[in-house]
Image (tube, coloured by chain):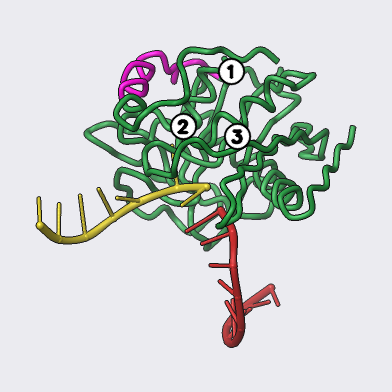
Chain colours: A green, B yellow, C red
DNA sequence: GCGACAG
DNA sequence: ATCTTGTCGC
């Protein structure tokens, strides 16, 4: 699928910050999701070993709403940017974009392991990928990066808003009764209510949405054994 | 200066 | 995130 090229990737943290501040105005958080057209949900994840500078990426495609596996695509690449809170996309996006560039099909929506606009400069990994792929994307993180929230009810489906600098940037969503919530935020071309509904519909039994669980599972096996499991 | 800090 | 050993609950 087509991948936009809006900037270079060999940047300093200061330059990366300027890119984020420049691109954040282009994020679309008002377009409703066209539910009748959602057939393929994608999820992306990156894995690496403590010693090696190599990053392994995987993009999983699952049928919606069945959540059964459609296919998996992989790639490995040298990390060119360190992990710095607030700059995750400059480390992980490059290898993931190489995978998307080779994707033979276009997913209808992408689930990302990280924040969307619930970010210091309102431009986390999910927003960055969404803009470069021109796809609806959702940020679904396991921990908070910025903002404050009240604990949501213990029931599955309950959620509370995440506020940051006077704005509502996302929500803490309980995807399973009595477990820690996940932190959902708009990536691009989707609304927060639709993002929450999608994450919930993708989480039939575990805290982490099925597409992201599969992506994590497959990318780790790829990193450990270099085995690729296609499917189709 | 101090504490926080996606993956 | 990765690394690593043990423990709690369905």
Mark 3–mark 1 Cα distance, whole angstroms, equals 13 Å
Local SS, label 1: helix
Which residue, given by chain and number where applicable, does mark 1 sit on? A133
- The picture places residue A197, in percent across and down from the top left corner, at 57, 35
- The picture places residue A159, in percent across and down from the top left corner, at 45, 46
- Marks 3/1 same chain: yes
Please tell me which residue is depicted at 36% across the width and 24% down the height of the picture: A20
Q: Which of the marked residues, 2 or 3, is nearer the chain's N terminus?
A: 2
Local SS, label 2: helix
**Front position among marks 1 and 2:** 2
Quarter location, residue A185? top left
| Residue A111: numbered disc | 3
Mark 2–mark 3 Cα distance, whole angstroms, equals 18 Å
Which residue, given by chain and number where applicable, does mark 2 sit on? A90
Q: Chain of mark 3?
A: A
**A189 to the left or right of A60:** left
Q: Chain of mark 2?
A: A
**Front position among marks 2 and 3:** 2
Mark 1–mark 2 Cα distance, whole angstroms, equals 15 Å
Identify which residue, A171 or A94, lies in the foreground.
A94
Quarter location, residue A56? top right
**Span highlighted in magenta in the image:** A18-32
In the picture, the quarter occupied by the C terminus of chain A is: top right
């Amino acid at each position: 699928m087509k991948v936009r090229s809006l900037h270079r990737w060999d940047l300093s943290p200061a330059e990366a910050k300027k890119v984020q501040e420049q691109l954040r105005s282009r994020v679309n958080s008002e377009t409703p999701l066209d539910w009748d057209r959602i057939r393929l949900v994608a999820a992306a994840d990156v894995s690496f070993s403590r010693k090696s500078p190599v990053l392994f990426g995987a993009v999983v495609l699952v049928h919606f709403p069945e959540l059964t596996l459609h296919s998996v695509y992989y790639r490995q690449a040298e990390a060119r940017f360190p992990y710095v809170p607030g700059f995750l996309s400059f480390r992980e996006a490059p290898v993931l974009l190489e995978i998307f560039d080779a994707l033979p099909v276009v997913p209808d929506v992408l689930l990302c392991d990280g924040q969307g606009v619930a970010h210091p400069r309102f431009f986390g990994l999910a927003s960055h990928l969404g803009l470069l792929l021109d796809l609806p994307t959702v940020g679904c993180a396991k921990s908070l990066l910025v903002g404050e929230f009240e604990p949501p009810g213990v029931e599955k489906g309950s959620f509370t808003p995440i506020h940051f600098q006077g704005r509502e940037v996302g929500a803490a969503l309980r995807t399973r009764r009595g477990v820690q919530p996940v932190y959902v935020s708009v990536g691009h071309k989707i609304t927060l209510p639709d993002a929450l509904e999608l994450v919930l519909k993708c989480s039939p039994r575990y805290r982490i949405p099925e597409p992201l669980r599969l992506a994590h599972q497959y990318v780790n096996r790829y990193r450990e054994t270099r085995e690729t499991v296609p499917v189709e």
